[in-house]
């Protein structure tokens, strides 16, 4: 068994400067995913996936964004335990959080028909595509930030 003894604070690379074409492509995909999609739902997706993936950088960024857009602290504190706190979330939000978890933790059996159907009950085909794109994008960003060791509290957007 190997133990990584490097401090988490040692950033490995900064994709916007080391790989600007890749970064610009990711930003373009993020913008396409966000188009015509509910911004509050998008933040719930970003927060839940970032919690699952252990991405402190993205979690800090998106909790801050969600708070700035008016999502209550009470709701933000319950995202990690949404199943045990259903009164904080609408049926649509619960379906989105469940779908986010299923796509983020894909596993060998994929996303179950029941999970997909619960989400699809709240979106048309275009909306389901946007939902999926939003989950895919935060998972991509989480992997960039965790692998590169982006420090929590810094925000490359300058916010």
Image (tube, helix red, strand yellow):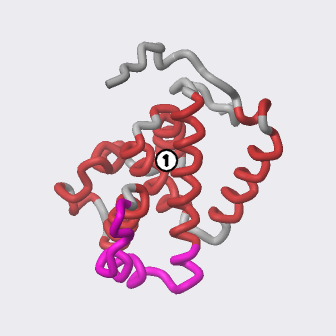
For the point 55% across and 33% down, which residue is it? Answer: 147
Picture residue at 38% right of the left edge, 69% below the top: 110
Magenta stretch containing residue 115, yes or no? yes
The image position of residue 150, as x and y in percent, is 57, 28
Image x and y of residue 148, in percent: 59, 30
**In the figure, 131 relative to 113: above or below?**
above
Whether the magenta-drawn stretch holds residue 36 is answered as no
In the rendered image, which residue does mark 1 sit on? 66
Q: At which x and y percent is residue 6?
A: 47, 14
Asked which quadrant contains residue 100, the reply is: bottom left
Q: Residues within 10 Å of mark 1 (few under 14, many from 20)?
A: many
Whether residue 118 sits left or right of residue 158 in the image: it is: left
Q: List the single residue furthest toward the left.
A: 84
Residue nearest the observer in this picture, 131 or 140: 140
Front position in the image: 91 or 56 = 56
At horizontal 37% and vertical 22% (from top left) the residue drawn is 2
Q: Please indicate whether residue 40 sits to the left or right of residue 97 in the image.
A: right
Quadrant position of residue 17: top right
**Which segment is the magenta one?**
107-129
Quarter in which the C terminus is drawn: top right
Q: Residue furthest front?
A: 1
Instruction: Report the number of numbered marks.
Output: 1
Q: Measured along the vertical axis of the image, is residue 93 above or below residue 143? A: below
Please tell me whether residue 141 is drawn above or below residue 36 in the rendered image.
above
| Image vertical order of residue 139 relative to residue 134, above or below | above
Q: Secondary structure at mark 1?
A: helix
For the N terminus, the quadrant is: top left
Q: What's the residue at 79%, 48% (across, down)?
A: 24
Q: Quadrant of residue 105?
A: bottom left
**Percent x, y of residue 33:** 64, 64
């Amino acid at each position: 068994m190997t133990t990584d003894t490097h401090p988490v604070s040692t950033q490995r690379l900064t994709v916007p400067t080391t790989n600007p074409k890749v970064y610009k492509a990711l930003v373009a995909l993020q913008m396409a995913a966000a188009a015509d999609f509910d911004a509050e739902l998008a933040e719930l997706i970003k927060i839940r996936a970032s919690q699952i993936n252990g991405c402190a950088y993205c979690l800090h960024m998106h909790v801050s964004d969600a708070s700035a857009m008016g999502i209550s602290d009470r709701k933000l504190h319950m995202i990690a335990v949404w199943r045990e706190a259903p009164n904080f979330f609408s049926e649509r939000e619960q379906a989105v959080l469940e779908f986010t978890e299923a796509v983020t933790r894909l596993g060998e059996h994929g996303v179950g028909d029941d999970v997909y159907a619960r989400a699809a009950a709240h979106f048309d085909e275009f909306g389901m595509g946007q939902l999926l794109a939003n989950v895919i994008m935060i998972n991509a960003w989480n992997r960039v930030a965790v692998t590169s060791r982006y420090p929590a509290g810094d925000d490359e957007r300058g916010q």
